Amino acid sequence: MVRAMKRIRRKTKKNMNNNNKKKLLITASTFPRWAEDTEPRFILDLAKELQKDFQVTVLVPMAIGAKKKEVLEGVEVIRYHYFPIYKWETLCYPGAIVPRIKEKKSRILLVPFLFLGLWIALKTNLHKYDFVHVNWLIPQGIVQCCFNKPYVITGLGGDVTSLNKGWIYKRKRKCLCKARAITVVSNSLKYQIEKIYSGANPTVITMGVDTKEYGKKNRVYNYFNDTNKKKVLFVGRLVEKKGLKYLIQAMAGIDADLIVVGDGPMREELVELSKDYKVNTQFLGAKTKNELKIIYASADIFVVPSVAAEDGDMEGLPTVIIEAMASELPIIAYNTGGIADIIIDGKNGFLLNERDVEGLKEKIYDLINNYELCSYISLQAKHTSKKYDYEKIGEKYRKVMERAFEQRA
């Protein structure tokens, strides 16, 4: 009886605390479709952190096989349909909207339906929430500005740097003008935002990771089951801006194996390129968070060969860099987007000019053959990653949101 009363009191106290919290709606277009999904989960991880101070619900597009409503790792998730024939809702997953369209041109016909579906979902649900955290200017931002609900908006990469013409540019500017606060994940995106709207004054806050989950403690001996050679790791979508073809070219003639984690429309082309350059490459496909922790820890070098795509799409600050740093991997990257915000050349990694294949080859060779250099860079990378733990990143987002909510419209 006493135990039962204590449980009731604890539950009542918890409910009272929840009732005092402001209700936050997070909108996004990239999100895990189910438990142990291979889709990027940084929005889910941020939502989990923000639940300490807000009642959080995430609103995202429907994906084939996903549930319309569920609680995922403690976070309430609502998925909205955007096309009457549900099996055709293939614009957003797997991957991202722009690569999905490049993969199959007819998917561009789904774009207006996605905008309409989001508008209907917001019209239906917004009254339940106190304010909104909008992720990506397109489509979330330019739809959100149709409503009067206060919101904070976050620019993450190509949504800021591309499609800056015509009516989309005008709508992007409007959504920035109406936002209570603007955040971006890198200084390069801050500059781009200020070009669109000079009064933006965005705050730079990266996404983060739970650094405690990563590290050499996850290493599995001979995980890749082939040779005793060093393993050079790439993690990302197989699309133009990720620049994997330059890494494959750089690996030619190097006595190491290339491990590729990720999938995308360029997979077949990159497999053939790897054969042409005689690079021993394992294409592992997309992996879950738990699988990735082992892969990072079992590799030796991490390379981020990202470049600016022809259409202007470029990186914000890839979360995989922080995950690799937390896993004590030395990192080589091209200096594009926001990557220079976290990597200091020669200190916690190496930065090269975009598309510098020979420079990339040289740095990979150096790290393979210089144990002391490799160990030093790995240690500094691990130390850097602690700045990006989600407890610290979440606190920054909380402060921005609390200030924004207190503003008068």
Image (tube, rainbow, N blue to C red):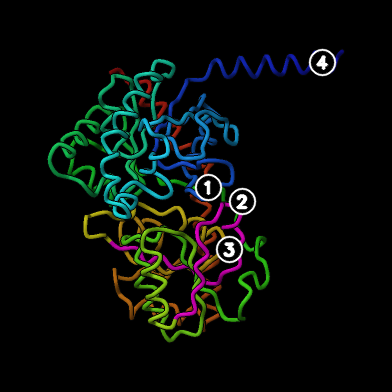
Residue 168, magenta (yes or no): no
Q: Earlier in the sequence, mark 3 or mark 2?
A: 2
**x, y percent for residue 287:** 54, 56
Does the residue at mark 2 contact the one at mark 1 (Cβ under 8 Å)?
Answer: yes
Does the residue at mark 4 contact the one at mark 2 (Cβ under 8 Å)?
Answer: no
Check disc 2 and give the amino acid type. Answer: Lys
Q: Earlier in the sequence, mark 1 or mark 4?
A: 4
> Which of labels 3 and 2 is toward the front?
3
3D distance between C-alphas at marks 4 and 3: 45 Å
**Residue under circle 3?**
295
Check disc 4 and give the amino acid type. Answer: Ala
Q: Earlier in the sequence, mark 4 or mark 2?
A: 4
The residue drawn where x is 30% and y is 39% is 110
Question: How many neighbours does mark 4 have within 10 angstroms: few (below 14), some (14-19), or many (20 or more)?
Answer: few
**Residue under circle 1?**
389
Q: Earlier in the sequence, mark 4 or mark 3?
A: 4
What's drawn in magenta, residue-wise? Answer: 279-307
**x, y percent for residue 397:** 43, 36
Q: Is residue 155 above or below residue 401?
A: below
Check disc 1 and give the amino acid type. Answer: Asp
237 lies left or right of 289: left
Which circle marks residue 212 in the picture?
A: 2
81 or 167: nearer the viewer: 81
Which circle marks residue 4 in the picture?
A: 4
**x, y percent for residue 241:** 32, 60
